[in-house]
Image (tube, rainbow, N blue to C red):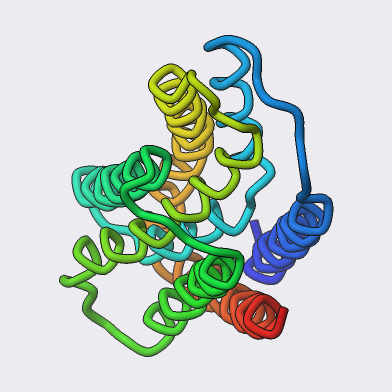
Amino acid sequence: MKLVSATRVVFAALVLLGSSVAQAHEVEGAREAADGFGDWVGLGLRHILEGADHLLFLLAVLLVGGSFRRMLVLVTSFTLAHSLTLGLTALGWVTLDARGTRWAEAAIAASILYMALENLLLRQHRHRAGLTFLFGLVHGLGFAGALREHGLGDAVVPGLVGFNLGVELGQAVVIAFLVPVLRILQRRPRLHSRVMRVSSIGLAGMGFYWMVARAVG
């Protein structure tokens, strides 16, 4: 595959994902409550697949490559963090008003921007697991906001477990595709470097745009 063709494919994919996340946030609003554990799983699965900002953050985190073990550590760090704040918020131990939710969404966009800039400016990323965990806490607030939209009612435990399970299943599907692709790219350092730079520039631009758009309302 030629370098120009590869970078065009990556850029086109980022544009499509950017469009999908913009549309997903535009259609947010009051929704009907889920009925049963299976519905909660489905809602979590749908949210992670439609919530491209979460997936783009993971892409920014993993773009630099590394061993399979390192990628697993990064993904696990993100998973543990967003599961923690999702649980705390769903149980009412952490609360956000409308303004707080808006700033949490802006911070999610900022996390994409920051990771993309790191990809472009830094050669070493030894602290990335810790940063991924910290940003994952913020992403968990976004998941919690989506969970609240469907009204937990008395089904707090099954709703929380089912929704989180759906999120993890959707994330696992994406990671199962993404990691092998990144590993293949790493075997061709020149191609990997080009794809990482072009993708990170696109991610930084989208992260900055979403951050400003969400902060101002």
Left or right placement of residue 99 versus residue 209 in this view: left
| Nearer to us in this view, 105 or 59 | 105
Picture residue at 69% right of the left edge, 85% below the top? 216
In the displayed structure, would residue 38 be above or below residue 24? above
Residue found farthest to the left: 126
Quarter of the image where the N terminus is located: bottom right
Horizontal side, residue 186 vs residue 9: left or right: left
Q: Is residue 194 visible?
A: no
Residue appearing at x 76%, y 51% in the figure: 24
160 to 8, vertically: above or below: above
Residue 142 location in percent, x, y? 52, 54
Q: Position of residue 139 (x, y in %)?
A: 44, 57
Which quadrant of the structure image shows residue 212? bottom right
For residue 213, what is the image quadrant?
A: bottom right
For the residue pair 211 and 155, the one nearer the viewer reads as 155
Q: Is residue 166 left or right of residue 131?
A: right
Which quarter of the rendered picture does the C terminus lie within? bottom right
Q: What x and y, as percent, mark residue 85?
A: 34, 50
Name the foreground residue: 190 vs 83: 83
Return the x and y of residue 160 as percentages of the image width and height. 43, 28
Vertical side of 203 occupied by 180: above or below: above
Q: Residue at x 41, y 74 (%)?
A: 115
| Left or right: where 103 falls relative to 32 | left
Res. 67 visible in picture: yes
